[in-house]
Image (cartoon, helix red, strand yellow):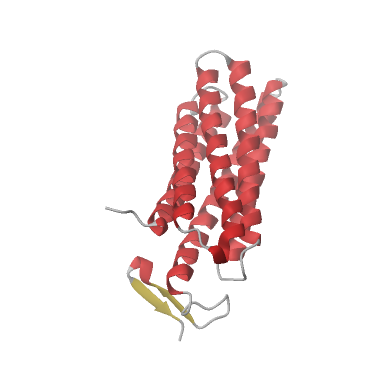
Amino acid sequence: MTIRGEDLLISGTWLLVVGSLIDTIGQTQQTFTHSDLGKDLIIKGNGIEACGNSLQAIGRTKLLTSERELPQIYTIFGNWIEAAGNTTNSVGVSIDMNGAEGEGIKLDTLGSGVQGLGAAFEAIGAALEEDSSYRTLAITGNSFVSLGSFLGAIGNIYVINEKNEIGDQILLVSSLIQFIGAVLLINAITQEVEYMEHGENLKNGNGDSYPYSYNNYSLTKP
């Protein structure tokens, strides 16, 4: 059975939401207990996000067309970079939990920076898209993920310099911003898939018709 690119794209984005939520819960536990409690959830959350990014990249590759080639190439490239960053985060936190705290945090910092770069490429890809109902959401969502990731790197730098309290607080804000970005992206990707499948019926922003056949129902403004 062949899996459609649209399904991979939607599934990957939902994994991104779930992974970022798990990561946020773990970071919340770590911040308020000032201990390693929650790091196991952070590892799992980043791993799930990496899987989601990979599914997004594969789905977009299957959907690649000459009409949208440049923005899609930017986005696919960003997906893979973000997957590498999330994987590095998971490995770094695992090393930290196993006793090599300094090395683990440095690797986690690198992973956050790489993740932020990947999300920035995705935001650029969205900005290069033609005007549509999902474009602004995609730009905003990816920008939130990018900002949150770079904040995560800054938070880890504070931790490396033994300013753990402020570092953990920055890391918590970082996780929350990334979760908000992921929620925005699931809305953007759902609209994008609908636009690809029913573009002739979808109107930009102020349009009158907005069918959501992907979810087996249709919404039409009166």
Q: Is residue 199 visible?
A: yes
In the image, 103: left or right of 44? right
In the orientation shown, which residue stands out farthest toward the top? 99
**In the rendered image of this protein, does residue 100 appear above or below residue 140?**
above
In the orientation shown, which residue stands out farthest toward the front? 66
Task: List x then y, in percent, for residue 195.
Answer: 48, 70
In the orientation shown, which residue stands out farthest toward the bottom? 222
The image quarter containing residue 154 is: top right
In this orientation, which residue lies closer to the viewer: 120 or 76? 76
In the image, 192: left or right of 140? left
**In the rendered image of this protein, does residue 95 appear above or below residue 54?**
above
Task: List x then y, in percent, for residue 190.
Answer: 46, 62
Could you tell me which residue is drawn at 46 percent across and 51 percent down? Answer: 13
In the image, 54: left or right of 69? left
Task: List x then y, in percent, for residue 177.
Answer: 60, 47
The image quarter containing residue 197 is: bottom left
Locate the C terminus by quadrant.
Answer: bottom left
**In the rendered image of this protein, does residue 26 appear above or below residue 119?**
above
Total number of numbered discs in the rendering: 0
Could you tell me which residue is drawn at 73 percent across and 21 percent down? Answer: 161
Q: Can residue 138 be seen in this view?
A: no
Task: List x then y, in percent, for residue 192.
Answer: 50, 65
Could you tell me which residue is drawn at 65 percent across and 48 percent down? Answer: 120
Could you tell me which residue is drawn at 41 percent across and 59 percent down? Answer: 6
The image quarter containing residue 109 is: top right
